[in-house]
Image (cartoon, rainbow, N blue to C red):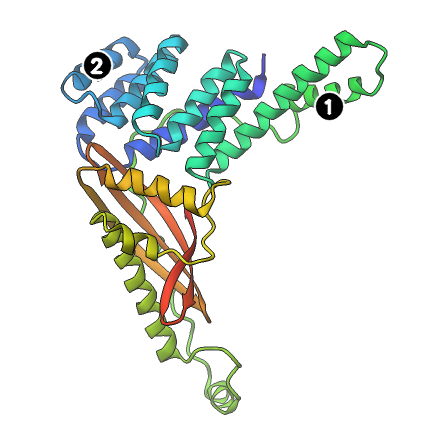
Amino acid sequence: MLHARTTVSQALRLLALAALLGAGGVHADEYSDVNALMRAGKLAEALAKADQYLGTKPRDPQMRFLKGVLQTESGKPVDAIGTFTKLTEDYPELPEPYNTLAVLYASQSQYDKARAALEMAIRTNPSYATAHENLGDVYAKLASQAYSKALQLDASNTGVQPKLALIRDLFAPGAKGQRPSPPAPPAPAPVAKAPPAPAPAPAPVAAAAAAKASAPAVAGAPAPAAAASAEKDVESAVRAWAAAWAGKDMNSYLGAYGRDFDPPGSQSRKAWEEERRARIVGKSRISVKIENLSVAVSGTKATAKFRQGYSADSLQVSSRKTLEMVKAGDRWVIVKESTGA
């Protein structure tokens, strides 16, 4: 038995559950009721309530995710795998179901399937640290199986045993660096807000102020007024990008990405654009809300961080988003995009 797998599963489930339940706020009472029953150990009642809800809203991703969690907790991994598999098919843009699906496969020693699911999660969200860590664990288990097979075929190979022992030590109970078990699942939390802005620095003494005034300006450092203007330009570019996305204006949306944009995963720029076009144009309606936008400008480079509220058809997701931008001529364009950062 892979000892670390249980804690990976719990941590993954909590992370995914918090991400989905924190999104939107619609039907929060139903989610809270099911979650409360689950916390109380009343799994059958919770599952019945989830099924009742899904009877009227069968495509709701949050409740379907909860149902999968309940099936897992009730000792029904095959049913849970079916639930999460269908969820990945209907909402391929969500990385959490892929992660949870991978953990279920790993619990059945189906490591190749677990690896494939985690690679899909990372392709969907390259900045999802938990998926990367879980993928490392899966690769270690696959290596363990390969080394064991090598020893069965050639017991005289003295170079394999130390490698196998190293991997077994990695997953042994009490191994150094093993993650502690997480706490019990919390009640759904409200969408996190950006931290408060730092307090302004104390005013310099008169002598320091005079010295600063007489000192030559640092080359390339924008004046306060210019910096403020640049921040406004970046903010306008971010909001125009969100408006183009919501309006399914593909020319403006794709045009917001610079020539040096780095697509997620190993996709080519062309493949990424085709995928984005298919996902966006196919939606009947899209809403993209930008909240708690924070912009930092350094010369011709800028970083915009914000909470993105995305909804399309019956899907609602709230997540942290970071856009790295550069100035190209008189425009600010996106060169890197990450979620959860």
Dots 2, 1 in contact, CB < 8 A? no
Residue found at x 46% / y 86%: 209
Label 2 sits on what residue type? Asp
Residue furthest to the left in view is 56
**Judging from the image, what secondary structure is the residue with disc 2 in?**
helix
Residue found at x 44% / y 47%: 269
Regarding residue 109, the answer to whether it shows in the image is yes
Residue found at x 39% / y 30%: 96
Label 1 sits on what residue type? Leu
| Label located before the other in sequence (2 or 1) | 2
**Quarter-wise, where is residue 42 in the image?**
top left
Q: Is 261 or 323 nearer to us in this picture?
A: 261
Q: Is 195 or 60 nearer to us in this picture?
A: 60
Q: Position of residue 32 (x, y in %)?
A: 23, 26
Q: Is 325 or 200 nearer to us in this picture?
A: 325
**Quarter-wise, where is residue 274 in the image?**
top left
10 to the left or right of 168: left
199 to the left or right of 189: right
Rendered image: mark on residue 51: 2
Q: Position of residue 219 (x, y in %)?
A: 53, 81
Q: Where is residue 90 in the image (x, y as percent from the top left)?
A: 29, 26
**Quarter-wise, where is residue 275 in the image?**
top left
Rendered image: mark on residue 26: none
Bin the neighbour count of mark 2 within 10 Å (Cα to Cα): few under 14, some 14-19, many 20 and up: some
Q: Position of residue 113 (x, y in %)?
A: 50, 19
Bin the neighbour count of mark 1 within 10 Å (Cα to Cα): few under 14, some 14-19, many 20 and up: few
Give the Cα separation between the discs numbered 2 and 1. Answer: 45 Å
- Residue bearing mark 1: 166
Regarding residue 341, the answer to whether it shows in the image is no
